Image (tube, grey):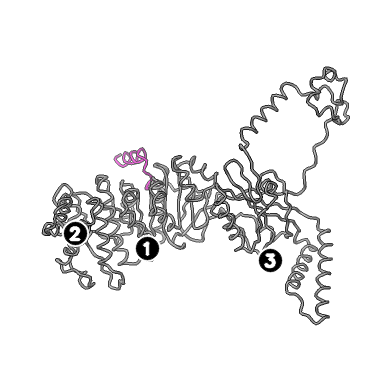
C-alpha cells in the first residue's frame, strides 16, 4: 500500500554554476552529444560550459551502469489499452474515487485495506490555506441561504440536500474560525492486478462492490490508465488530481492504523504483533466458528504454538482432547493431571468403533450415522471394494447389530454394542463369495497380528480437563485407522455432554490421504460449532489440504488460520488460497521459528509466538532440551 503525503511541491533544482559563481545556461550545441568530438570545445574555446562540466570516462561509466540497472528491472513491454494496461504478463487497472459518504467512522476503509486480493492503494493529502477556504465557504453559504430563501418565498419546500449541505458548511466554518479544524484536499486511488483480463474484470467488480457498500463511488480511469497507474506508484505525484474536501477529523479516519491490530478485551494470548509490538489476544469462540487450521513445515513451531494455546485456555475452563501421533503432548497432560492414553496391541485402553451414541434427546439418525461411519472405516481397513462387496458389507453390519438386539429404535441403543469379531463371524456365516473374501481381509484385525486393538469394548473416560491419545507405538499403516476411530468416539462423547472443548488433530495429513477419513474430518469441522467445540487441525503438508476439495472446505470453515514458515514448493498454492501479498510470501519463506501470519476472520497480522520459561519447559519438543531436562531430573 502506498501512502504518499504532500505539503508542498518540491522546488526545481538550481542551475549549475561556474568557478566564478555565474550560472551556466546550456546552449543548444551543448545538448548535442556530438560536441564531445569537437577538439576546440575540449580546450574551453567553444560553447558555454566550462571544461570541468565535460563528462569524464568515470561519469560515462556511471551513466552506463544506471542504464544497465534500469534495463534489468524494467518489464519487457508495457501495453496501454482503453481501460487497462499490461506490464509484462500482469494486467492492471486503476480506479479513482469521485463520491464519498457524508458520515464516516474510524477505520471506515478497513474492508478495502483488508480486501482478499493484493491492491495498491494511494492516498494523497493536500493542505489548503484557511483564509481561502473561509472565503469560499462564506460565498457558498450565502448561495445556499439565498436558494433556501427563494424557495420559501415562492411557497416551495427547500431541498433537503441543500439544507444538509448548509448545516455542514456552517459547522465547518465555525470549526475553521476557532482553529479546531483544518481543511485538506484528499485523493484516493486503487490499482488492481491480475493474470488475465477476465480475472481483472471479476476483481474490479468485487472491489467496486466493496466500495459501494461503503457508499463510495469509484470509476475506472479510462483513457488515462497510464497516468492513473503512475499515480499509485511511489513517485509521490498525483497525475489525476481528483480531490475531495475533508477536514481534520474526517481525514484522520482514513488512516488504516487499526488494520494490523488484533487484540480483544478477553481471550488467549497468541503472541506479539510484529507490525507494532502489540499483544495478539483473541477468543476463538467469539467468532462464527471456533475452528483453527495450522500449516507449517517441520520444525517451524506449529505444535509449540498449539501447546501454548492449550495451557492458556485452561484459564477459561476449556477442556481439551488431543490426537497425538508423535507423543508431543505427554508433558502437558501429566503436568495438569490429565489423561494420557497410549494405543497399542498390548495397551489396556480400548475403543469399540461399534459403540452408539445414546443422547436421550437426539433428533439425529444415530444408526444411519453409525452405518456410514463403519462403512468408511472398513474401506480404509480393507481397501477398495466392488459394488457387490459394498452391498454385502452393509448387510453384514445390519445383521451384526440385529444379533445384539440393536435396531433403529433408540431404546435399544443402551444394549451392549457388537465388536469387530462379531462382524467377522457374520461375514463367515454368509454364503456369498464376496462375504468370504471380506472376512479373509478382516481376519488380521480380529485374529492376526493386530488383534487386541479393535475388538474390545470401550473403557476410556473423557472427563479430565485434558485427554491425550498418543499413537507413537502404532505402525504408520494403522495410525489413520486408529485416528479415525478416536474421532468418532470423541464425536459420540461431545454430542452427549455439551461443554466448551478443543479438539486438536495433530499430523492430520494421515487422515487426508484417504477420501473417507478426509470426508469425516471435514464434516467434523463443519458441525463442531453446534456442540461448543473448536477443532484445531495441524499439518506440515500444505498440499494435502489445498489440493483436495475436502481440505479446501476445512480451510473455508476455519475462522482462525495460522501459517508458519512454508516450503518454496508449496508457497504458490498457499499464496493463492490465502490471498497473500508478495511481501507476505517472502515473509513466510524466510520466517524464523515461531513467526508467521495469524488470520482471524477478515483480518490478519504477522505474529511472533512468545512463552514464559515454565510454558517453554512444557511445550518444547527439541531433543536437546528434553535430554537436558531428563539429566537434571536424574541429578
What residue lies at 35% left-to-right and 53% top-to-bottom?
Answer: 505
What residue lies at 44% left-to-right and 43% top-to-bottom?
Answer: 570
What residue lies at 70% left-to-right and 28% top-to-bottom?
Answer: 63
Number of callouts: 3
Q: Distance between the residues labelled 2 and 3?
A: 70 Å
Instruction: Read off the residue under disc 2.
Output: 392
Crowd band around label 3 with a 10 angstrom C-alpha radius: few (<14), some (14–19), many (20+) = few
Q: In this view, does 172 lie to the left or right of 389?
A: right
Q: Residue 188 carries which label?
A: none
Q: Are marks 2 and 3 in contact (CB under 8 Å)?
A: no
Instruction: Read off the residue under disc 1.
Output: 527
Expressed as whole percent of the image width and height from the top left, the position of residue 417 reads 19, 64
Sequence order check: which comes first, mark 1 or mark 3?
Answer: 3
Q: Is residue 367 left or right of residue 193?
A: left
Instruction: Read off the residue under disc 3.
Output: 102
- Above/below status of 110 relative to 230: below
Crowd band around label 2 with a 10 angstrom C-alpha radius: few (<14), some (14–19), many (20+) = some
Viewer-side label of 1, 2: 2
- Picture quadrant of residue 45: top right
Q: Is disc 2 placed on a helix, strand or loop?
A: helix
Q: Distance between the residues labelled 1 and 2?
A: 30 Å
Q: Is disc 1 placed on a helix, strand or loop?
A: helix
Q: Which of 539 and 153 is in front in this view?
A: 153
Q: Is disc 3 placed on a helix, strand or loop?
A: loop
Magenta region, mostly helix, strand or loop? helix
Amino acid at each position: 500500500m502506498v501512502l504518499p503525503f504532500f505539503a508542498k511541491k518540491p522546488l526545481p533544482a538550481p542551475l549549475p554554476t561556474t568557478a566564478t559563481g555565474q550560472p551556466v545556461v546550456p546552449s543548444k550545441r551543448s545538448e548535442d552529444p556530438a560536441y564531445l568530438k569537437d577538439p576546440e570545445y575540449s580546450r574551453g574555446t567553444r560553447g558555454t560550459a566550462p571544461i570541468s562540466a565535460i563528462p569524464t570516462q568515470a561519469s560515462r561509466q556511471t551513466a552506463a551502469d544506471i542504464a544497465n540497472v534500469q534495463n534489468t528491472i524494467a518489464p519487457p513491454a508495457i501495453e496501454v489499452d482503453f481501460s487497462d494496461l499490461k506490464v509484462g504478463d500482469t494486467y492492471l487497472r486503476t480506479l479513482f474515487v469521485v463520491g464519498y459518504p457524508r458520515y464516516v467512522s474510524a477505520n471506515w476503509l478497513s474492508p478495502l485495506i483488508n480486501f482478499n486480493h493484493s491492491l495498491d492503494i494511494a492516498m494523497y493529502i493536500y493542505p489548503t490555506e484557511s483564509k481561502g477556504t473561509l472565503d469560499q465557504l462564506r460565498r457558498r453559504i450565502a448561495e445556499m441561504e439565498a436558494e433556501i430563501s427563494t424557495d420559501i418565498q415562492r411557497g416551495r419546500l427547500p431541498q433537503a440536500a441543500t439544507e444538509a449541505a448548509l448545516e455542514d458548511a456552517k459547522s465547518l466554518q465555525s470549526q475553521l474560525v476557532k482553529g479546531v479544524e483544518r481543511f485538506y484536499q484528499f485523493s484516493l486511488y486503487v490499482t488492481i492486478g491480475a493474470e488475465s483480463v477476465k480475472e481483472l474484470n471479476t476483481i474490479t467488480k468485487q472491489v467496486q462492490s466493496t466500495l459501494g457498500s461503503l457508499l463510495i463511488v469509484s470509476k475506472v480511469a479510462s483513457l488515462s490508465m497510464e497516468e492513473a497507474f503512475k499515480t499509485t506508484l511511489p513517485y509521490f505525484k498525483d497525475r489525476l488530481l481528483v480531490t475531495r474536501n475533508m477536514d481534520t477529523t474526517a481525514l484522520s479516519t482514513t488512516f488504516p492504523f487499526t488494520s494490523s491490530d488484533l487484540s480483544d478485551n478477553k481471550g488467549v494470548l497468541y503472541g506479539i504483533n510484529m507490525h507494532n509490538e502489540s499483544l495478539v489476544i483473541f477468543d476463538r469462540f467469539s467468532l462464527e466458528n471456533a475452528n483453527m487450521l495450522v500449516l507449517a513445515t517441520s520444525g517451524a513451531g506449529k505444535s509449540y504454538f498449539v501447546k501454548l494455546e492449550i495451557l492458556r485456555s485452561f484459564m477459561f475452563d476449556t477442556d481439551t482432547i488431543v490426537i497425538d501421533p508423535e507423543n508431543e503432548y505427554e508433558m502437558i497432560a501429566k503436568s495438569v493431571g490429565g489423561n494420557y492414553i497410549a494405543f497399542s496391541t498390548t495397551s489396556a485402553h480400548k475403543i469399540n468403533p461399534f459403540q452408539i451414541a445414546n443422547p436421550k434427546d437426539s433428533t439425529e439418525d444415530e444408526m444411519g450415522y453409525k452405518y456410514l461411519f463403519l462403512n468408511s472405516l472398513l474401506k480404509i481397513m480393507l481397501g477398495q471394494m466392488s459394488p457387490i462387496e459394498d452391498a454385502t458389507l452393509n448387510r453384514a453390519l445390519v445383521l451384526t447389530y440385529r444379533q445384539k438386539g440393536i435396531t433403529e429404535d433408540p431404546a435399544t441403543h443402551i444394549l451392549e454394542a457388537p465388536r469387530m469379531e462379531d462382524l467377522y463371524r457374520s461375514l463367515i456365516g454368509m454364503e456369498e463369495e464376496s462375504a468370504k473374501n471380506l472376512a479373509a481381509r478382516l481376519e488380521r484385525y480380529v485374529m492376526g497380528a493386530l488383534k487386541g486393538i479393535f475388538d474390545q469394548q470401550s473403557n476410556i473416560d473423557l472427563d479430565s480437563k485434558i485427554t491425550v491419545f498418543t499413537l507413537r507405538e502404532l505402525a504408520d499403516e494403522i495410525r489413520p485407522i486408529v485416528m479415525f476411530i478416536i474421532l468418532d468416539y470423541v464425536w459420540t462423547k461431545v454430542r452427549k455432554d455439551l461443554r466448551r472443548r478443543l479438539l486438536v488433530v495433530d499430523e492430520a495429513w494421515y487422515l487426508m490421504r484417504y477420501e473417507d477419513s478426509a470426508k469425516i474430518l471435514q464434516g467434523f469441522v463443519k458441525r463442531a460449532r453446534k456442540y461448543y467445540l473448536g477443532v484445531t487441525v495441524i499439518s506440515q503438508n500444505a498440499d494435502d489440504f489445498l489440493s483436495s476439495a475436502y481440505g479446501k472446505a476445512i480451510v473455508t470453515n476455519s475462522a482462525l488460520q495460522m501459517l508458519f514458515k512454508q516450503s518454496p514448493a508449496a508457497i504458490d498454492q498457499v499464496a493463492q488460497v490465502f490471498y497473500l501479498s508478495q511481501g507476505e510470501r517472502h515473509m513466510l519463506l524466510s520466517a524464523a521459528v515461531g513467526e508467521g501470519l495469524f488470520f482471524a476472520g477478515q483480518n490478519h497480522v504477522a505474529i511472533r509466538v512468545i512463552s514464559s520459561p515454565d510454558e517453554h519447559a512444557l511445550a518444547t519438543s527439541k531433543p536437546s532440551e528434553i535430554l537436558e531436562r531428563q539429566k537434571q531430573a536424574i541429578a
